[in-house]
C-alpha cells in the first residue's frame, strides 16, 4: 500500500482531452500528488474519457473492467473517470457495478482536490456541472507527455454548433473564449522553455471571440499575436468550422510565414442534403469556395478533413457526392468514420439510423481507399522539393533516422546527422508513402 499520493492518468479522445489532462496534472501536483507512469504504482488512477462514437465508449468500459483487477490487488486504489463520458454517463458509471470512486466532468477539474478529500473520507464523489466561464486560463498545464518541441494551448472551450450527430455540445457545454493575454504569455513561456511549435485548440477556433471593454479580439487577431511571439515559433490551430473560416484568417496566415501551411477543415459530407440534415450550415459549393480561397492565397497549404460515412438516410448518390468532393478538394489527409448514433442528439431524436452496417462499412472503405490514393499523390508531388522540417526527435522505426514535420504537417524521416529536437532542417524529399516523406538534408 502506498501512503503517498500518486496519480496515474490515461487519456482517450481528441486533443482537447489531452490538453485537459495536462491541466488536471497541474491541479493535482499543486495539491501534493506525484505523477506516476505506472498505474500499479499509483494511489489514484484517472481515465480521461471520450464519448464521440459508441466505439470510444466501449473502449473505456473495457478499460474499466481491466482496472478492476488492479483494484482487487490494491484495495485502497482510487479510480476516477473524468472527461466527456463522465459528463454524459455519470449515473451509469457510478451504478455500473465497477469500482469507481470519482466522476468529474470537463469543467470541474479545479475542484478535484476537494472531491478527492471526499473520496479519502470513504465516499463516492461526483461533479459534472458545466460552466459558462471556466477556461482554466490561470492554470499552467504540466506538459508531462511532451516531446519538448510541440505543445497544445487550449484557447476556448465548449461548442454551440449542435451538429445533429454530435455529443460535444452536451459534454462540453457553452462556447467560451480564453483571455488572449494568458494565451500569448503561455506561448512566450513555451518558447523560452525551448518549444518551437504550438497548436491553438478549440472545437471551432474560428468563432473565438474575446470581448473586453466593448472591443472584440477575433481568432485571426489572436493567431497573429501568437505568431508574433517569435518567428521561430510555428503556430498551428485546430479545428476550423468551414462556415466560419474568414478571408481575414486566410490573409493573416498568408502574411505570417510561421503560421503553418495546414488547415484542418472538417467537411463531414459532400452532399448538400446530408449537410443540411447534419446542421452544418454550409453547402459543398461554400466549402469548395473556401478551399479555393486557401489554395489561391497559399498554394503550398495542405488541407485535411473529417468525413462521416453512412449518416441517416444517406443514399448512394449522397455518398458519390462525398467521393466527388474529396477529389475536387484533393485532401492531403483525412480522419474518416462510420456514423455512430449518440443518444440525446437531434439526429438520434429526429432521424432514423437507417443505413445498414455493411453499407456504412463499404462506403467507409471506399472513402478510405480514395483518401489513400489522394494522400499518396499529395506526398509524391513533394518529391524533389526542399522542405523545412522541425525535428521532433529520433524516428521510432529506426534509431539512425530523425523524424520531424513540415509546415504542412507532413511527417518526414531523414538520416540522423546530429540535429537536436527543436531545430529546423532543410530536407530534400527523395521518396514517399501515403503516410510519410523520406529525404536527406539539403545544403541549398
Ligand atoms: N469540432 C470539430 C469536430 C470534433 S469531433 C469540428 O467540427 O471540426 C471529431 C470528428 O468526429 C467530427 O469532425 C466528425 O467527423 C466525427 N464525429 C462526430 N460525431 C460523430 C458521430 N456521432 N459518428 C461518427 N463520427 C462522428
Ligand atoms: Fe461537434 Fe459540430 Fe461542435 Fe464540431 S462543431 S464539436 S462536430 S457540434
Ligand atoms: Fe471525445 Fe469529448 Fe473530444 S467526446 S472527441 S473527448 S470533446
Image: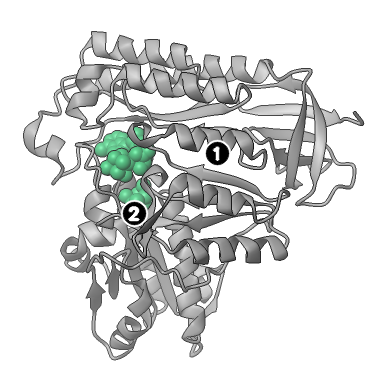
Picture coordinates of residue 142 (x, y %)?
56, 69
In the image, residue 234 sits, relative to residue 359, either above or below, namely below
112 on left or right of 419? left
Q: Quadrant of residue 104?
A: bottom left
Q: Is mark 2 within 8 Å of ligand 3?
A: no
Indicate the quadrant containing the C terminus: top left, top right, bottom left or bottom right: top right
431 is higher (above) or lower (below) than 171: above
Q: Mark 2 points at which residue?
A: 60
Q: Position of residue 88 (x, y in %)?
A: 21, 57
Q: Quadrant of residue 286?
A: top left
Residue 229 is tagged as: none
Compute the Cα span from label 2 to label 1.
40 Å
Nearest the viewer among 145 and 222 is 222
Q: Residue 252 carries which label?
A: 1
Q: Is residue 192 above or below residue 61?
A: below
Q: What element carries label 1?
A: helix
**Residue at disc 2, secondary structure:** helix
x then y, percent, for residue 307: 36, 27
Residue at 56% over, 33% down: 262
Q: How many residues crowd around disc 1 within 10 Å: few (fewer than 14), some, or many (20 or more)?
A: some
Q: Which is nearer the N-term, disc 2 or disc 1?
A: 2
Residue under the point 41% across and 78% down: 74
127 on left or right of 378: left
Tags 2 and 1 touching, CB below 8 Å = no
Q: Would residue 55 be seen by someone viewing this image from the given angle? A: no
Number of disc labels = 2
Q: Name the colouring of the figure.
A: one colour
Expressed as whole percent of the image width and height from the top left, the position of residue 415 reads 85, 36
Identify which residue is drawn at 26% across, 66% down: 131
Amino acid at each position: 500500500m502506498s501512503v503517498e499520493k500518486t496519480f496515474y492518468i490515461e487519456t482517450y479522445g481528441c486533443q482537447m482531452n489531452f490538453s485537459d489532462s495536462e491541466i488536471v496534472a497541474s491541479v493535482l501536483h499543486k495539491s501534493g500528488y506525484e505523477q506516476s507512469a505506472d498505474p500499479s504504482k499509483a494511489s489514484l488512477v484517472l481515465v480521461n474519457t471520450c464519448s464521440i462514437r459508441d466505439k470510444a465508449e466501449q473502449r473505456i468500459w473495457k478499460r474499466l473492467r481491466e482496472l478492476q483487477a488492479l483494484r482487487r490487488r490494491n484495495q485502497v486504489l482510487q479510480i476516477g473517470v473524468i472527461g466527456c463520458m463522465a459528463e454524459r454517463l455519470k449515473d451509469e458509471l457510478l451504478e455500473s457495478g465497477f469500482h469507481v470512486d470519482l466522476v468529474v466532468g470537463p469543467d470541474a477539474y479545479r475542484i478535484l482536490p476537494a472531491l478527492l478529500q471526499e473520496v479519502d473520507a470513504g465516499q463516492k464523489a461526483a461533479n459534472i456541472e458545466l460552466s459558462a466561464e471556466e477556461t482554466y486560463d490561470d492554470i499552467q498545464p504540466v506538459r508531462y507527455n511532451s516531446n519538448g518541441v510541440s505543445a497544445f494551448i487550449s484557447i476556448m472551450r465548449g461548442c454551440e454548433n449542435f451538429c445533429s450527430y454530435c455529443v460535444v455540445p452536451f459534454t462540453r457545454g457553452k462556447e467560451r473564449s480564453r483571455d488572449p493575454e494568458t494565451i500569448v504569455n503561455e506561448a512566450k513561456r513555451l518558447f523560452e522553455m525551448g518549444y518551437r511549435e504550438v497548436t491553438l485548440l478549440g472545437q471551432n477556433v474560428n468563432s473565438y471571440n474575446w470581448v473586453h471593454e466593448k472591443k472584440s479580439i477575433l481568432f485571426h487577431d489572436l493567431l497573429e499575436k501568437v505568431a508574433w511571439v517569435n518567428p521561430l515559433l510555428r503556430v498551428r490551430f485546430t479545428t476550423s468550422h468551414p462556415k466560419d473560416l474568414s478571408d481575414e484568417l486566410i490573409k493573416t496566415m498568408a502574411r505570417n510565414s510561421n503560421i503553418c501551411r495546414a488547415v484542418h477543415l472538417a467537411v463531414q459530407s459532400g452532399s448538400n442534403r446530408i449537410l443540411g440534415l447534419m446542421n452544418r450550415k454550409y453547402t459543398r459549393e461554400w466549402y469548395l469556395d473556401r478551399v479555393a480561397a486557401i489554395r489561391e492565397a497559399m498554394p503550398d497549404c495542405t488541407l485535411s478533413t473529417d468525413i462521416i460515412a453512412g449518416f441517416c438516410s444517406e443514399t448512394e448518390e449522397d455518398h458519390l457526392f462525398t467521393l466527388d468532393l474529396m477529389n475536387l478538394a484533393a485532401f492531403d489527409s483525412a480522419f474518416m468514420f462510420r456514423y455512430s448514433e449518440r443518444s440525446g442528439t437531434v439526429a438520434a431524436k429526429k432521424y432514423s439510423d437507417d443505413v445498414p452496417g455493411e453499407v456504412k462499412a463499404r462506403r467507409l472503405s471506399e472513402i478510405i481507399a480514395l483518401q489513400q490514393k489522394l494522400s499518396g499523390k499529395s506526398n509524391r508531388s513533394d518529391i524533389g522539393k526542399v522542405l523545412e522540417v522541425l525535428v521532433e526527435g529520433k524516428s521510432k522505426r529506426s534509431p539512425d533516422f530523425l523524424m520531424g514535420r513540415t509546415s504542412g504537417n507532413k511527417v518526414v524521416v531523414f538520416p540522423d546527422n546530429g540535429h537536436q529536437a527543436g531545430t529546423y532542417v532543410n530536407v530534400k524529399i527523395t521518396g514517399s508513402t501515403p503516410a510519410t516523406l523520406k529525404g536527406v538534408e539539403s545544403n541549398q
